[in-house]
Amino acid sequence: MTKNSTSSTTSTWTGMVPVDDTALAVTDTGGSGVPVVYLNGQFATQGYWRRAIAELGTGWRHITYDERARGRSKRSADYSFAAAVRDVDAVLAARGVDRAVVVGWSYGAFVGAHWASRNPQRAMGAVLVDGAFPYDWLDEAMEQRIRKLFRRLSLFLPLLRPTGLAPRMSAAQQAESNIEIGRVSRERELAPVLDAITVPVRYVVASGTSFGSRGDEQERIRTSLDAVCARNPNIQIGAKVTSNHGAILRKDFRAIAHAVREVAALDREGR
């Protein structure tokens, strides 16, 4: 069995990790604790994880980073989902980490699910926060709705970018990223990925709506998880919380931290 990390720094490291045509802003708290890599929401930054990290405390090695064109990371010619999954490997390699728990929220949950499925020897486990539900929610009408939404937002994005609340991507690029994750979400695409996972996975599931959703469509999407758990005993719903999608990291960080502890403990038991 490989060690958790081949590089165990004792103080926090922050810097830029070159990858492809860009560079990612990374923070690594170091230490000899279990490495946990945090994967952000689609247009979020690493700062969103601060409450979960504080709840887990200093006994863990926390690795956060901004995705391409988000936060302090540089722009790229490639904002694809495939690039986002590759970037997990780039960050872990740069920090000398062999094995880690992956924790992903929203878009990051899809990235974490794919990474864990492809890397069973390197993934100690995964915590997927209100994302990675295999459901066919994208159709032509939804694509048009997404494009229309981001065309409207295009007037405000330049004002938000200096505050860090919007990525340095065009409105069209953001729309395409949303549409692509809709394709990645399709049952025929995502279900085989989840079924192939052989490490412990715990979902922390929100309630209610998210930005851009209508009616009960978000809750209907979440119900697709029941069949996943029935097929794969490695995957369980760790918690169903009252927070909505956007507030879950802020209000239910304790449930996320609990799930991280659980999957790390299961990894230790399985060695």
Image: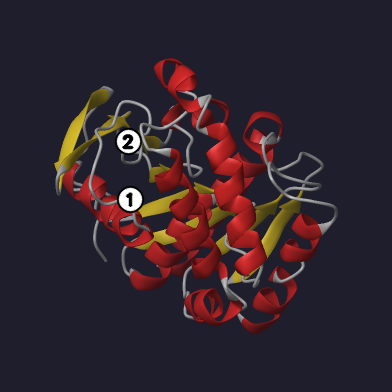
Q: Badge 2: few (under 14), some or many (20 or more) residues near its Cα, within 10 Å?
A: many
- Which disc number belongs to residue 79? 1
Residue shown at 47%/29% (left/top)? 166
State the residue lying farthest toward the right.
215
Image coordinates of residue 156 in percent, x first then y, are: 53, 24
Amino acid tagged 2: Ala
Answer whether residue 178 is visible to the viewer in this image.
yes
Horizontal side, residue 86 vs residue 81: left or right: left
Tell me the SS state at disc 2. loop
Question: Nearest the camera: 143 or 248?
Answer: 143
- Which disc number belongs to residue 33? none
Image coordinates of residue 230 in percent, x first then y, are: 70, 80
CB under 8 Å between callouts 1 and 2?
yes
Residue 187, compared with residue 156, is above or below; it is below
Q: Which residue is mark 2?
A: 69
Question: Nearest the camera: 21 or 261?
Answer: 21
Horizontal side, residue 249 vs residue 47: left or right: right
Quarter of the N terminus within the rendering: bottom left
